[in-house]
Image: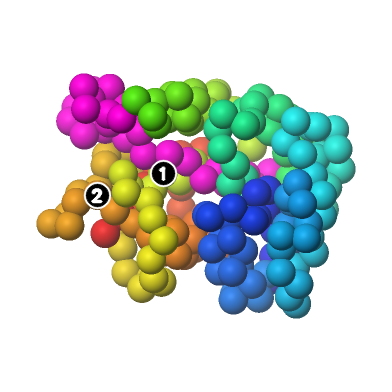
Amino acid sequence: MARIALIGASGNVGTRILNELVSRNHQVTAIVRDPSKVPAQAGVTAVRGDVSDPAGLAALLKGHDAVVSSVRFLDSDPAALVDAVRAAGVKRYLVVGGAASLFVAPGKRLLDQPDFPDAYKAEATAGAAFLDALRGVADLDWTFISPSAMFVPGERTGKFRLAQDELLVSEKGSTISYEDYAVALVDEIERPAHVRQRFTVGY
């Protein structure tokens, strides 16, 4: 059992990560803007926190074994988040990443493809910048976890593939459910295999 701080616990992905952590008997501090959005359950303490307040966030993160951030990249500053984790004295930091920085061919990212949707470009570009920023961090045991291109609600099967920097594609395309992504992320907390690395999960 570990003490995990989960930033963004009430979002689509954060909710599934919270459920997965609880199902494995971890103690979770759910850090959200509105604690009323986090259902009361054993093992979970919901607290109000804001990614735009690094000092306040650092105070909430102290005493945890790991920090997970599941927040929109356009709503956060990677340097401020890293500083908050660092100031809290927590070494392990996991980030819910994006798929756009994954490679679809040597030297060619998904983000750079001509058919990449304009509607997602700003968020995707910010996500790629977040990963670049993390790669310069040597004093935290960070992991950036990229989903597949289609990241959607689904079911928890526990059956998926992992890769490093290449987009995973199957006969069904490039996809992963929120639920199975959460399994892969919590697996990484329990059995670290990608410290100071990015990896991706897909079917």
Residue at position x 75%, y 46% from top? Answer: 33
183 and 138: which is toward the camera:
183
For mark 1, what is the residue? 146
For mark 2, what is the residue? 174
Where in the figure is residue 18, as x and y percent of width and height? 62, 63
| Residue 90 in sight | yes
| Residue 27 in sight | no
Where in the figure is residue 52, as x and y percent of width and height? 75, 30
Kind of residue at disc 2: Ser
Name the image quarter holding residue 56: top right
Secondary structure at numbered mark 2: loop
Secondary structure at numbered mark 1: strand
Q: Residue furthest front?
A: 119
Query: Disc 1 or 2, which lies upstream in sequence?
Result: 1
Range of magenta residues: 91-117
Where in the figure is residue 145, as x and y percent of width and height? 45, 46
